[in-house]
Amino acid sequence: MEKRRRHDGSFFLAMLPLYVTTLVFVLLPVLYVVALSFMKRDATWGVTSEFTLENYIRLWDPIYLKVLLDSLKIAVKTTLLALAIGYPFAYCMAKLPPRKRGIVMVLVIVPFWTNALVRIYGWMILLRANGVVNTLLLEIGIVDVPLKLLYTDGAVLLGMVYSLLPFMILPSYTSIEKMDWSLVEAARDLGAGKMRAFLTVTLRLTLPGILSGCVLVFVPSMGLFFISDLLGGGKEVLMGNLIQNQILTARNWPFGAALSVVMMLMTLLFLFVYRKSTKQSQPEGMA
Amino acid sequence: MGDVILQLDGIAKRFDETDALRGISLDVERGEFITFLGPSGCGKTTMLRIISGLEHPDRGRVILQGQDVTDTEPNQRNVHTVFQNYALFPHMNVAANIGYSLKLQGVKKQEIRERVEAMLELVQLPGFAKRTPQKLSGGQRQRVAIARALIDNPDLLLLDEPLGALDLQLRRQMQTELKRLQKRLGITFLYITHDQEEAMNMSDRIVVMNEGTFEQIGTPAEIYERPATSFAAQFIGTANIFHGRVEQLQGDAAQILTDEQMILAERAEGLAPQEPVTVAVRGEKIRLHRQPQPGFTLAGVVREHHYSGGILRMIIGVPGSGGEQEVVASHQGMESAFQVGDAVYLDWEPAAGILVDRKGARRNGEKA
Amino acid sequence: MKGKKHTQRRWGSGIYLGVILALMYIPIVLVIVYSFNKQKISAVWGGFSLDWYRVLFHDQQMMGALWNSLKLGISSCLISGVIGTLGAVGMTKGRFRTAGAIESIATLPIMIPEIILGIAFLTFFSFVGIPYGMPAMIIGHCTFCIPYIFINVRTRLLGIDPSIEEAARDLGAGGGRVFWDITLPLIAPGILSGMLLAFAMSLDDVIISFFLAGPTSTTLPVRVYSQLKTAVTPEINALCTLTMGVTFCIVIVSQILGSNKFKRNRREEL
């Protein structure tokens, strides 16, 4: 018994920095945001530590409700589109011979680690009024006037899906690749049609991967303010933009904090549902 | 000989809700090859880990060379283990693996190199020093693991099912080699296996384990010829078990009444009429007849024949109160005078009916 | 008949993979191509030139931002390398009741939207009086770098066959010796690939730096972001091409570290 404790002592020491940084620099700041959301804004700027619910009441203003709804809408659209594109991609990838599979894998991972700004910038080059797409269309003669492609809702959605697609592909691929294909064969053998076998076996067994892909796409899509800034021209106001605006420009920290708390709650709710449905503590394919 | 190198005294260990070991004691002599034989989950690996120091017992003492080492760390004990999956260090080559314990002791590089070479010769892997473990076959990894554990002359070598992952032919070959190695080095081997044939082939003594206790300790011949419990009788070789009561004693024999039949068994010391007994009979001791035999009323019908490796096994259905009991009789050769469906009468020499599970024996020995 | 259908399907899936990959790479390739364009108006090709790289290297502010980014990336990847590794070892080897809770909180930074983390740091640091700038950014980056290293190392630790460490103890190694001789070499690839990824994440981060950069310590991505919002100069193309080159190398190295050794370990377990 004594011995056990002696070992535990050094392990505890090893964990101490993690404990401290986690508590001081993750837990405390997050708790502070929560506390802040219940405070009053000071006359000039800053906060007074006076309890109030007004920040949350203000959320019910139709202007802000619309932002909330718009953000949710774009997050849902992004997730569904990413799923519609990413899952078949992962499926085709898993069916490739191993060597080619490895190459495609690296090809998917490289943009995943490439600066998101750079990739968004590439789309700006493509979609600008005098950008590549318009130049091509004018050259061929399909259009006479340049189309408005950049600074539209479609461009924002495109940028979101584009940035987050690898987060859908990787976990889906992991679960498809792990799947025991003989189960599909068994289902076919027992008389299930191709579609039915896919729906009842493949889809069912790869559900954990699909769900974790959805979490990994949905959660950040609510916060990527720079995408709607760059591709939507800041015209479309989403949660992320609103928060950034309230904190940095309007300097209304308590209200910004309240918005953050709402976003955090939505995220945690989503993660909670995910954990309940897959009994997994972390989305697959995180690192 | 006769000098005790290891003493286990009342070792007990619990994991969560299960008793892994229930207070076992044993003396191991220097230079002995002793095998712990039992089904998986019987506590044999736990016992080995307690001897090596990787586990701490809840109760009891481990005494090595007369010194109590119960609370000594594994790295302070001169006892080494050959792990079931070899546990070679994947990032070191063969020489570094084998020389690891010497390096820890601060032995000079030149001497380590020489001793590693000698060890490689001994386990018949000369020239393998620079290979990485990943490039070795299962049998070669096994030899490296053994060399690594033997290089600094441990007091005891613990082997945890070391041949379990090898195919049958290689296993047989390694059995012979291990035995030869042990004889040559004179190091005490504590060997764990669930393979009775392996235990029979290699051991000076076998300890039969079941559910955290020792069922029987003895030489391979003793355990086969005179099993102490029905578990030991059935785990080593095959045995037919009959439960009954002593009817009467006559000369060297005891007449036993099972639920419906009369059989004969040995007359063990202190046996008294009406005593409930369990009789174990080896299949090859059972004789088949067309006529009833004196002292026996055991009769049945031949249900199946199996021929395997020079032995013919016959399964005979014997009617009993709880339905038909299967009795297995075996013979050398491939022919039998009896066909499937024939009615047969059974008997054996009284001495072949061994009384097992007697006093001092275990209560759960009846489980088969 | 069946064979033909099969080939058709294979072609179909190949085309699909190709199209999606092409869409993934077109913007990236465009950036690279235009970084060598002589013309200032990006859509038109005016011949090959390295002018924009020259402009970039003479841009004092850009170079300052680059230097900041490197300082930030290296220090946060080193600090979180130590903290994350120690934490993973302590948590895996020792059994603590609070470990599960700490693990959840420690991995929170990569689970919640980054903007929330940015806001939390911005407001909290102002509250406790940590000035914005390099130290604040290092703290911020460490919090999201630690989980990557922690998860990487922990996965590896859990993958080590416990009997390998037991064998070392059995052969006479004490606790510290086992760690140096056995555990550390076996988790080293995990630590390294985790640190490389953390470095890449730090180099790419816009959001956290955006909130925490003081007036003097702008990082490269923050600077690129503000440039993209206003006037775009082709200099950005050159810069993006360079950063992509660096990231690409990091990814390749970490992939090699990750896959090969890991596979070898896995085989060892069999």
Image: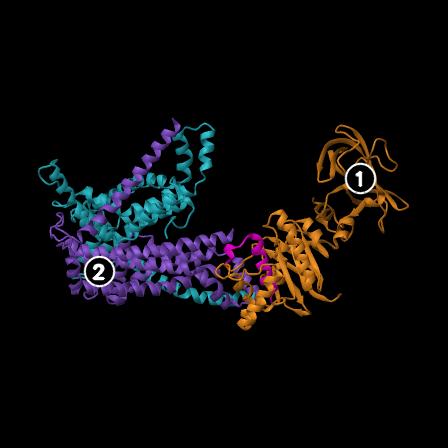
Chain colours: A cyan, B orange, C purple
Q: Where residue A152 sits: x, y (%)?
A: 16, 43
Q: Is residue B133 magenta?
A: yes
Judged from the image, the secondary structure of the residue bearing numbered disc 2 is helix
Disc 2 chain ID: C
Query: Which class describes the residues within 10 Å of circle 1: few (<14), some (14-19), or many (20+)?
Result: some
Q: Nearer the viewer, residue B252 or A242?
A: B252
Q: Where residue A194 sits: x, y (%)?
A: 40, 30
Q: Where residue C61 sits: x, y (%)?
A: 17, 64
Identity of the residue furthest to the front in this view: B127
- Taking A42 as reference, is B5 left or right? right
- From the image, tell me which residue sits under label 2: C220
Disc 1 chain ID: B
**Position of B112 relative to B242 (above/below):** below
Q: Nearer the viewer, residue A247 or B128?
A: B128
Residue B243 visible in the current orientation: no
Type of amino acid under label 2: Leu
Q: Nearer the viewer, residue B32 or C87?
A: B32
- Splitting the image into 4 quarters, where does residue C65 fall? bottom left
Instruction: Give the overall secondary structure of the magenta segment.
Output: helix
Residue B356 visible in the current orientation: yes
| Quadrant of image for the N terminus of chain C | top left
- Taking A190 as reference, is B215 left or right? right
Q: Where residue B59 sits: x, y (%)?
A: 64, 62
- From the image, tell me which residue sits under label 1: B286
What residue span does the magenta drawing correspond to?
A: B132-151
**Position of B314 relative to B33 (above/below):** above
Judged from the image, the secondary structure of the residue bearing numbered disc 1 is loop
| Residue at x 21%, y 58% (from the top left corner) | C222
Q: Nearer the viewer, residue A134 or B211?
A: A134
**Position of B4 relative to A232 (above/below):** below
Q: Is residue C152 magenta?
A: no
Query: Which class describes the residues within 10 Å of circle 2: few (<14), some (14-19), or many (20+)?
Result: many
